[in-house]
Amino acid sequence: MHLRFLQQKGMTIVEAVVFVSILVVIIGAIVMSLKYTYQGQRFAFEQADATRSARKGIGQAVRFLREASYADDGAYPIYSMSTSSITFFSDYDNDSKIERIRFFLDGTNLKRGIVESSGDPPTYATSTEVVSVVSDNVRNNALGTPLFTYYDSTGTLMSDYTKVADLAYVLVKMVVNIHPERAPDDYELRSSAFLRNIRR
């Protein structure tokens, strides 16, 4: 009597189990879809942030390189250069004093070091260097891609980095990717600087 009442008034147990199973599958599909959508959006925001960081770093390096000047102690504007770092003198903070500026790769970070001149006659104490990260998620080291490429006044690619006096033009190429193990591919930024203030 009781079973007949259930059959007349509603679903059977089998129907209820099928209904609940279908409902669980639908809810699971919706949850997974929302999860992947959220992950995709989060990744897009992270990648955009990494790209902004890279633009900031490459922009700073190029801007200060273009204004490279003779140091307060008379040193040549370019101090040293390599494929992953460059050290030069420029007025970083527009205070009419020339700072020693170093841009260099440290793992996946592009860092900037600043040394102020001090004393009379002026000197640059590297122990006072203030280092900060200007870009992260940089992939140049992992890919073996030079961050800095150097050219002389004739446009010839330089291979002897000790000849700093021959430097006329610097190409900066930065590759960034916050998650290199998945799409999208690496993002590459390029910029360049002519050394305007060097007397030849």
Image (cartoon, grey):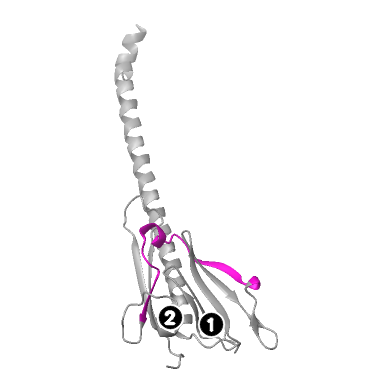
Asked if 81 appears above or below 135 in the picture, the reply is: below
Name the outermost residue toward the right.
119
Type of the residue with mark 2: Lys
**In the structure shown, which secondary structural element does the residue marked by tag 1 occupy?**
strand
Q: Is residue 126 left or right of residue 169?
A: right
Type of the residue with mark 1: Phe
Residue at point 36%, 69% (across, down): 189
Q: Is residue 84 left or right of residue 95?
A: left
Residue 18 location, x and y as percent?
30, 23
Give, as a single range, the part of the protein colored magenta.
Answer: 127-151
Which residue in the structure is indicated by mark 1? Answer: 89
Q: Is residue 152 left or right of residue 135?
A: left
Please identify the quadrant where the C terminus is shown: bottom left
Residue 13 location, x and y as percent?
33, 16
Instruction: Mark 2 vs mark 1: give the one in front.
Output: 2
Q: Quadrant of residue 93?
A: bottom right
